[in-house]
């Protein structure tokens, strides 16, 4: 495992050459059929989702999508979904459950979009609904934090049986800039926040928030995408095989509930 | 014997509520309404349930005061009252901050959970208190709310949650975030069992609480003028680079946009809750 600081990992996680959802879908999945729209209001391109084959098995794959250049970023809103994106994701997940397909989500977002229309159309409600409905899906759900996973906007795709995380990805309550500006009224203190926030894969594994770290090449995923594709493919395949076995014996929604039910420290244990 | 205990319980909630009836500063005999600027006598304000008689502004109130306004006298039983924050991230200054706020507010954490009765119907109720670190979502808030939901499911009680929160508890980092999933998952199970959940959104309800249990009620009520949203107005203004329209993210705006069933003034909330319990037959008991 490399010895990057938390702030360095944040920079790697945001590197413009870092593979994103589009790259992983292209490399790990076959026959991808994109499904668009939330059936209520509009299509939100910051979330990409559809049906595809993973090792020959039909799955539903959904990921937040960042652009590789300004034009793409404007189209994908810099990877910040609105409520329509989350509602589309939920529509796809419910459909996956209906057809017995496992769900794989790929998370790489600065957070849910803090905009006027997003609020008017219920950003909070959309995220809440996803958390509630994802928790009770009776199909295997695997989430992978591939880049930055910030705030409820990331968690809205993250209520999974198994949460994998790339070695240099980060997962946190908020962006370090937002964190610093809330706590110290100074976004420039973000590098200090990075250390305090405990947002690296190792930290999160120790909290039990994630289940497995997927190794990246020295220097980060962008230096050699092919090796990351191979290691994520292996990790996903092993995880899915295991979950399918477990799912034939017991309720996957029940196991997911137990997993999230156990999260959080407090003292004493109440009465 | 039992009646003596009941007497004591009655006084305990009344005393706690009285202590809270001292917003915003106990020494002042007069309070400025932050909305219309009118100078109000504290005693008059208390009699008016901390609603400005001039403009109708609803002052934020403490959890015990809120409970004393909606529960039948003597019916209050607090749950998990001794649960307090841990320091999972070893965040500098956090334990001291918590101790300071505990001393200042008389609360152990940002939520009080309890059982009680409304017009003799037993309910499970949680009240978030914005005086405690802005009602932020700590692991304790998530755990107490989840335990209450599970208690309501097990004992077939209707569930009422009054929300008031600035969002995540920054000092608990990712574990604060996970409380959103935990509480929402518990509500999914409660929902599946047929339990009635009434969410009452009070000023302010934002961030992670909005994006979890606040938005998942079968019935959603809100206090007049309450700020309700996911992102805070300041963040949105910075993001879109323009001023937000008057009334944006207020309860009335949410109602207009289809996210609130009804806006209920503080004076009417108990009667409306009672009506809803009646309309749900056995009181919305989970099966």
Image (spheres, rainbow, N blue to C red):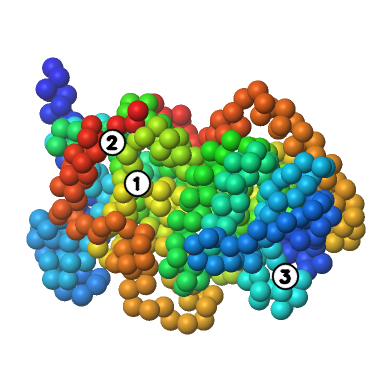
Please tell me whether mark 1 or mark 3 is closer to you in this view.
1
Mark 2 crowd level (few <14, some 14–19, many ≥20, 10 Å Cα)? many
Residue sitting at the far bottom: B242
Please tell me whether mark 2 or mark 3 is closer to you in this view.
2
Query: Mark 3 sits on what residue?
Result: A67
**Residue A246 is drawn in which quadrant?**
top right
Q: Is residue B81 visible?
A: no
Is B120 located above or below residue A183 in the figure? Answer: above
Residue in the picture at 51% in, 81% down = B241
Q: Quadrant of the C terminus of chain B?
A: top left
Q: CA distance from mark 1 to mark 3?
A: 38 Å
Q: Are marks 1 and 2 in contact (CB under 8 Å)?
A: yes
Q: Are marks 2 and 3 in contact (CB under 8 Å)?
A: no
Query: Mark 2 sits on what residue?
Result: B284
**Residue B42 is drawn in which quadrant?**
bottom left
Check disc 1 and report its element: helix, strand or loop: loop
- Residue B25 lies left or right of residue A81; in this view the side is left
Q: B5 and A106: which one is in front?
A: A106
Q: A115 and A220: which one is in front?
A: A115
Query: Mark 1 sits on what residue?
Result: B218
Q: Position of residue A132 (x, y in %)?
A: 49, 44
Residue in the picture at 59% in, 35% down = A138
Q: Quadrant of the N terminus of chain B?
A: top left
Q: CA distance from mark 1 to mark 2?
A: 10 Å
Check disc 2 and report its element: helix, strand or loop: loop
Residue in the picture at 59% in, 69% down = A187
Mark 1 crowd level (few <14, some 14–19, many ≥20, 10 Å Cα)? few
């Amino acid at each position: 495992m490399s010895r990057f600081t938390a702030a360095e990992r944040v920079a790697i996680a945001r590197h413009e050459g870092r593979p994103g959802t589009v790259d992983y879908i292209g490399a790990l999945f076959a026959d991808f059929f994109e499904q668009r729209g939330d059936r209520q209001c509009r299509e939100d391109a910051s979330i990409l989702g559809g049906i595809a084959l993973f090792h020959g098995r039909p799955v539903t794959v959904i990921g937040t999508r960042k652009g590789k250049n300004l034009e793409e970023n404007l189209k994908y809103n810099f990877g910040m979904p609105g409520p329509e994106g989350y509602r589309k994701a939920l529509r796809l997940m419910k459909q996956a459950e209906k057809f017995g397909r496992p769900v794989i989500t790929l998370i790489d977002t600065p957070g849910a979009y803090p905009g006027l229309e997003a609020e008017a159309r219920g950003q909070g409600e959309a995220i809440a609904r996803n958390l509630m409905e994802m928790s009770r899906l009776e199909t295997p759900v695997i989430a992978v934090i591939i880049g930055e996973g910030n705030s409820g906007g990331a968690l809205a795709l993250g209520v999974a049986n198994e949460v994998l995380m790339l070695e240099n990805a980060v997962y946190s309550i908020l962006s370090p800039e937002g964190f610093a500006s809330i706590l110290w009224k100074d976004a420039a203190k973000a590098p200090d926040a990075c250390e305090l926030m405990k947002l690296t894969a190792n930290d999160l594994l120790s909290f039990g928030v994630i289940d497995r770290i997927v190794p990246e090449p020295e220097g980060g995923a962008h230096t050699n995408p092919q090796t990351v594709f191979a290691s994520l493919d292996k990790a996903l395949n092993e995880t899915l095989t295991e979950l399918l076995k477990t799912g034939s014996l017991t309720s996957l929604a029940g196991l997911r509930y137990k997993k999230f039910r156990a999260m959080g420290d407090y003292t004493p244990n109440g009465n | 014997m039992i009646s003596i205990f009941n007497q004591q319980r009655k006084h305990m909630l009344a005393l706690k509520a009285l202590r809270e009836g001292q917003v915003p500063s106990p020494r002042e005999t007069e309070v400025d309404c932050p909305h219309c600027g009118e100078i109000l006598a504290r005693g008059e304000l208390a009699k008016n349930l901390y609603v400005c008689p001039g403009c109708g502004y609803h002052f934020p109130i403490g959890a015990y005061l809120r409970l004393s306004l909606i529960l039948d006298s003597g019916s209050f039983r607090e749950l998990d009252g001794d649960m307090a924050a841990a320091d999972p991230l070893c965040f500098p200054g956090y334990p001291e901050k918590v101790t300071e706020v505990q001393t200042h507010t008389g609360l152990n954490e940002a939520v009080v959970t309890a059982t009680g009765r409304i017009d003799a119907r037993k309910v499970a109720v949680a009240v978030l208190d914005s005086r405690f670190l802005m009602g932020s979502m700590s692991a304790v808030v998530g755990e107490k709310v989840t335990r209450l939901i599970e208690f309501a499911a097990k004992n077939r009680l209707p569930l009422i949650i009054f929300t008031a929160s600035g969002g995540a508890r920054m000092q608990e980092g990712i574990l604060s975030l996970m409380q959103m999933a935990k509480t929402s998952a518990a509500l999914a199970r409660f929902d599946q069992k047929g339990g009635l959940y009434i969410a009452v959104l009070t000023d302010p309800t934002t961030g992670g609480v909005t994006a979890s249990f606040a938005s998942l009620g079968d019935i959603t009520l809100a206090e007049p003028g309450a700020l309700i949203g996911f992102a805070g107005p300041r963040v949105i203004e910075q993001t879109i680079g323009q001023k937000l329209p008057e009334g944006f993210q207020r309860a009335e705006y949410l109602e207009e946009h289809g996210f609130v069933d009804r806006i209920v003034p503080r004076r009417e909330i108990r009667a409306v809750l009672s009506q809803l319990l009646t309309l749900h037959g056995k009181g919305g008991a989970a099966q």
